[in-house]
Image (cartoon, grey):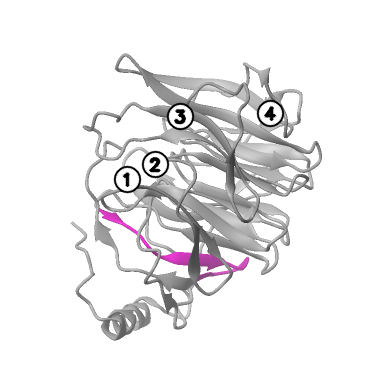
Amino acid sequence: MILPIRNFSTNALISAMFLGLAFFYTAEEPRCERNQPSRSDSLTVRNAHAMAYDSDRAKVILFGGADDRNVLGDLWEWGGKTWHKISATGPAPRTFPCLAYDRDRRRLVLFGGNRVLFGTENDKDTFLDDVWEWDGARWRMIETARPPARAEANMVYDSARHRLVLFGGYRVVSGNKIRLGDTWEWDGKTWEQVSASGPSPRNGAAMTYDPIRRRVILFGGNGPSGETWTWDGKSWSEVKPVVAEGRFNSAMAYDTLRRCVIRFGGWNGKERVGDTWTFDGTTWQRIDVAGPEARNHAAMVYDAKRQRLVLFGGHDGESVFGDTWEWDGSKWSLAAFHETRQRMNNGH
């Protein structure tokens, strides 16, 4: 059992981190950097949150999720050193929402999610279908016909076709879990269901957009699945052969500078894992590198201004994480941290 480390002082924690790293490291082993990470006293721990990159304001944006006890609806930004809260009002608190940045319309778009936290409260099966936009200053609800309510779906921005693409997720109807395999697109005015075929219905997959190949990339999901699929705007195609272990709720983003997909962690059917993988459009390859502790329900995006990926939070089944990690193409660096907190069971 992993115990919370909230009673450690900051100096003791950092010292312990360096001592542990010194013991672990040998000249032949890969490293991760932990060079004086800043302490996050405001943003604490979080899992089942959503993240996106605001390319106009050059900020990583985080919304909602849950800490160790509460479901939240706050909005935060990361500029490379510290997290700052930029809104505490707007969309209702939720876990597992979809969040993506629409570069053409310069809006952050939020869709759906779930009100669940502990798995026993009255609104544990309250799945949401609301659509919100954040313009950098305020939230606005968009009243329009939209996809059915769901959580643990995926949504990314297709920059070649200038629209958001949403896939899958799940909801609960009369106590039965219904997984979804539909594909929807949002052009800033209208939602349209564009496919009902392709990957089997699933939740907990990872999805990103490859601007070089002009394809949406989807990996994994419930099972856990080891499948990789691409969406070209007309149809889904499974990529074969692909060497990859199945994962559920891993974090994935496209590294624009290095022109590859990076994926971290997740659930492999037996345990949480902390491995890092790269995808070149054909093959998955594990990178032999140390990094964040094993976890799922984390989130990760590419920071274009700073040319690195940013990963935050997640949980390992016992503790919720509050650490911020960055990937520069060769190594992970711990950029900010908050002590882990013991996680209350919410059935996820």
Pick the residue in front: 211 or 269: 211
Q: Locate residue 157 relative to residue 294 in the image: left or right.
A: right
Looking at the rendered image, the quarter that the C terminus falls into is top left
Q: Position of residue 48 (x, y in %)?
A: 41, 45
Residue type at mark 4?
Glu
Report the amino acid beneath label 3: Leu
Residue nearer the viewer, 214 or 20? 214
- Nearer the observer: mark 4 or 2; the answer is 4
Judging from the image, what secondary structure is the residue with disc 2 in? loop
Asked if 199 appears above or below 173 in the picture, the reply is below
> Marks 3 and 1, how far apart in space?
29 Å
Mark 2 or mark 3: which is in front?
A: 3
Q: Nearer the viewer, mark 3 or mark 1?
A: 3
Q: Which residues are magenta?
A: 319-333
Q: How far from the left and from the top, in percent, is residue 332?
A: 52, 68
Marks 4 & 3, CB-CB < 8 Å contact: no
Give amino acid for label 1.
Answer: Glu
Q: CA distance from mark 2 to mark 3?
A: 28 Å
Lower sequence index among marks 4 and 2: 4
Query: Which residue is labeled 2 in the image?
Result: 268
Q: Are marks 2 and 1 in contact (CB under 8 Å)?
A: yes
Q: Residue 76: percent from the left, percent from the top?
A: 50, 59
Residue under label 1, please give it.
271
Crowding around mark 2 (Cα neighbors within 10 Å: few <14, some 14 to 19, many 20+) is many
Residue pointed to by mark 3: 128
Element class at badge 1? loop
Q: Identify the residue at horizontal 40%, vertical 64% (top origin).
A: 43
Query: Who's the residue at 31% across and 52% down the image?
Result: 316
Say which residue label 4 marks: 185
Name the residue located 68 percent from the left edge and 66 percent from the top edge.
Answer: 307
**C-alpha separation, residue under disc 4 versus residue under disc 2:** 30 Å
Q: Mark 1 or 4 closer to N-term?
A: 4
